[in-house]
Structures are given as C-alpha cells and as structure tokens.
Image (cartoon, rainbow, N blue to C red):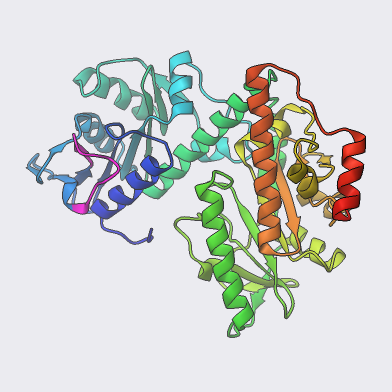
Amino acid sequence: MKKCMHPADRIVATMNRLYYHGMTTVSGGNLSIMDQEGNMWISPSGVDKGALTREDIMKITPDGQIIGRNRPSVEYPFHLSVLRKRPDFKAVLHAHPTPLVGFSLMRIVPDLTLMPDTSRICGKVIFAKYAVPGSQELGDLISAEFEKGYNTVMLENHGVVIGAPTMEEAFRMFEALDFTARVQIAAATMGKKAKGLTAAELARYEGFKAPAYKALAATAPTNQEIDLRNEMMQKSTRAYELNLFSSVDGVWSARLANGGQLITPEGFDPLEGCGCEMVRVVGDAAEADKTPSKYAAFCAKAYEKYPEINSVIVARCPSAMAFAQTGAKFDARLIPESYIQLKDVPVLPFMSLLEDPDKALEQITPKNPVAIIEGDCLISMGTSVLAAYDHLEVLEYSARALVSCAAVGQPVVTLDDAQIKELHEAFNL
C-alpha cells in the first residue's frame, strides 16, 4: 500500500489487509474515513469484503447525501456519530478478529502489558454494552465511550472499534491489541499465566534512549546495498504474511559489505514500507532524516563480535512470545529441524539487547543464534538474511507446535541425548 491514497482506495487496501490476514469475514467489519471536505467514506453493506473495489466504497456528504452504487454499512450511524463527536479522529475501524471476539465474549480486555509497546499504542481500552448492530442504541453506547476520551472500545459479544487520526494509525492500534490477545491465549493454552510487564518495566522501556546519530554523508548505494534493501523488504513482507512480524513489531538488520548496516526504521510497517526506507548506519552516523531502530546499536555490536553473522532480526511472534511472558521452558529438541536450527535457546533478562548488548552476545552466538528475552522480544541472528529468517520461522513454528501439544494435554516426548548426539555428528553441529 502507498502512504498517500484516496480515502476509497485506503479503505479497500485496509479491508484487504483485514480480510486476507484472517481478521474479519466476508460480511464482517466496516471502515470509515472523514476527508478534508467533511465527506465520510465508508465500506458498503452486503458486498464481499475480500473483493472490494474503489467503486464499492460509499460517500456520505456533510448534508447527509449518500453517493455510490451500494448501501453504506449498516453501522454507518455510529461511524458518523464517532467522527462528529471526536474531531481529532479522521478514521474509524471496526472488525471481528477471532482473538478479540473471544475476549468480547468473556468481557475481558486483553492484557496490554504483555508487549512493551501495546499500552502506549492502544491507550486505555473500555467495553461498551451490547446492542443490536446498526441500531441507534449501539451508536450511542459506542460514541459515549469515545466522548470520554477512549480511542479503543471493545463491544460485548461483538468485536472492537478503534478511532484514530488516520486509518494507518487505527490499524496499528487494532493489530497491537490483536497480537497481545494472541500471546495471552497462547500462554493460557499452555496452562500458564502471562506475567506482563510491571509499571516500572514499562517505564524503563519507554525511557530508553537510543544513541543519537550524526547525519551520514550522502553517497549512492552500491549494487550490493540495492539488492540487500530489496531482499530485506521481500523477507519482511513474508514475515508479516506469516504472522512473524506485525505493523507494530519487527526489526530487520543486515551487514553491508563496505561497512555498517542496513536496518529498518522506527515504526516500520512491512506492508506500507519499501526498501528505500531502510536506514544505512555506519558507526555513529545514519542516513539523514531517517531514524534507525533502537536495536541498531545491538546489531552493530553483533557484527563487530561475530564476523560470520550478517543479519539480525528482533520480533515478537505470538506463540514464541508466550514463552517470553510465562517463563515456560522452550526446548528445541522437538524434531530434527528444530534442534538443528535453534539448538539451545537461551533466555535472557528483560531489555538485555538494549541495556547490555555485550553481555547478551555472550549467550547469543553463531552456535546458538536464537534467544528469548523475558517479557520483551525474540532475537535471531544468521549468516545471511535468509538464515536469520529461517531461524525465526522455525522458532515460531516450534512454539506453535508446543502450544498445540498443551491444548491436547498429553506429555511432549523430545529427542533424547543419544538422538541429539547423532544430529551433532551428522550435521557437524
């Protein structure tokens, strides 16, 4: 998707993102945008959400005229009410992702402390009472909560509504809430309670200051850098498609052949961004007018310490993060591929990568390239962009397998010492 889009195109693009990532159904969910002229653009009623076109999007003028070939969403009264009562909002997103529907049935707000950025991104979350979809009563209940200053409202037995200055921001809030719900569900499936971060830990994370970078002298990229930007973008998009990254979390770095690194910028969205947004960082200098990820310093330390490491990923995949949040032991001796790729997965203290990278790199090594950071994130290193991606993917898929075992409730049988020894000999581990 492009950052500068007509409201109708943005609604189509966002609905595609929701539908094709399993966050809504053919008939579920609705989106609206208020443009600079006071027109509200809204998704239609009774049209396949997986096949919307620009011509399907409805326009409601300031005087109430409805323009378009379809009927606007039956929920349009509450969209209009929210946008009028909260002039700071220009977009409203309503959808029914499975995890958040589950929480709406239990009348529980997902734990916003399970991921370091979630509470900051979503703000306080409140429930609105149940009412018939499309009714004036539902619109009044929802808009009343937004009038109190909330930006995220969960609906009893329904789903979630989010308001924001842009549709991009609304989606990031929505996905952050959805991801933390997935982590909480995975933890509960394992019979564990996710601990969450304390107020002190959240303040520590929020208060962390990344190094200030000088402006790097502008130079034309080498062919290797151009290829690397494209490869990182392609793999970042794939990571997003497979729920390894989200629009909120996912950092990718790669070593440049002529020194320094390329790294994703702060707030990078794998589906909105492009390779040109990757930040070249050399020593204490970074490309002008770009903000490299806060993990750039850690990645630089990794490349300095280990010449064979050429790529680093920091992520918060839902199933593996359940281990980071519960303290449950992650044992990679599941299938041969899991052990070959992951070996012994160390668990490091909260914020280790940011606060003490040298000590962290004593345990995260080319031999043990993957680690779990308590309550924080996952780290994967590799000899190439593909190798780092492979390690991360195997970590999350292995974690999903363990969560599935917990759901069935039978003991897990891991590879024994003799079988592990055979793998070391066969693959020169």
Q: Is residue 47 magenta?
A: yes
Instruction: Give me the residue at 25% from left, 22% from top.
Output: 133
On the picture, is 69 further left or further right than 423? left
- Is 156 situated left or right of 398 in this image? left
Q: Which residues are magenta?
A: 43-54
Q: Looking at the image, which residue is at 81% across and 61% down?
A: 302
Q: Is residue 394 above or below residue 136?
A: below
Quarter of the picture holding the N terminus: bottom left
The image shows residue 126 at horizontal and vertical percentages of 44, 23
Residue 86 colored magenta?
no
Task: Residue 113 in the image: state x and y as whole percent.
Answer: 62, 31
Rendered residue at 59%/46% (across/down)? 244
Report if residue 247 is visible in the image: no
Choose between 342 and 291: the one closer to the eye.
342
Q: Position of residue 270 (x, y in %)?
A: 51, 55
Taking depth in this image into account, of 254 and 217 the one nearest to the observer is 254
